Image (cartoon, rainbow, N blue to C red):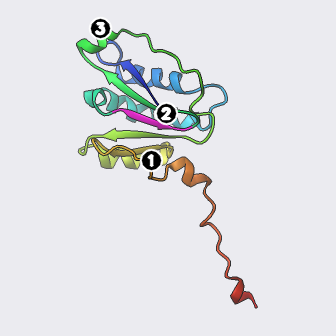
Amino acid sequence: MKLRRDIASVPVRTGAETWSEIIALITRPDSIDAGQLTAAASVMATLLSEDHYAKHPLTLKGDGHRLVIYGAYGADAVARGAEVAPLDWNPTGKAWTLHVPCDPEDLDWVTQTLKTRAPRLAVHVLGSGPTDTEQDASTAANDTSAALSINWGAAS
């Protein structure tokens, strides 16, 4: 099941304030790797200052429902106001990945920066969103099926 949240951004909040609101929405004290969200703050603040997220949401795949987070900008942000409906579960309580749409002009530096600071954030080009068949960073981190392969025939 997919759930949606809309968060007022510029001019109601700066990009940094929008990111802080998103972190508050998706984390709890028992969240896994929540520090990666904080480590990504400067990059995400820059991205969220642009109005791309009005049409291209952040997508969080984790524990429970899939969460899509849209930004509201300009008059839509003012009309929406600062309230954000809280979630009744912790989507980052178990393995999770946040899919981040990115303008092609920014893709290289954003990908490189987040790869080291926040590997649970998966960057993709605007309009080419995450699919159900792709392997998430959280799933890949826990997948040990290809980690060790033993040829028992060679042992004899």
Residue 134 pos. (x, y %): 44, 52
Question: Gap in Å between the C-alphas at discs 3 and 2?
Answer: 27 Å
Choose mark 3 or mark 2, whichever is in front: 2
Q: Main secondary structure of the magenta part?
A: strand
Residue 139 pos. (x, y %): 56, 50
Provide the residue designation for mark 3: 79
Q: Residue at x 34, y 43 (%)?
A: 129
- Disc tally is 3
Q: Is residue 83 above or below residue 147?
A: above
Provide the residue designation for mark 2: 1
Mark 1 / mark 2, whichever is N-terminal: 2
Amino acid type of the residue that numbered disc 2 sits on in the rendered structure = Met
Provide the residue designation for mark 1: 132
Mark 3 / mark 2, whichever is N-terminal: 2
Per the rendered image, the range of residues in magenta is 57-62
Q: Is residue 1 above or below residue 120?
A: above
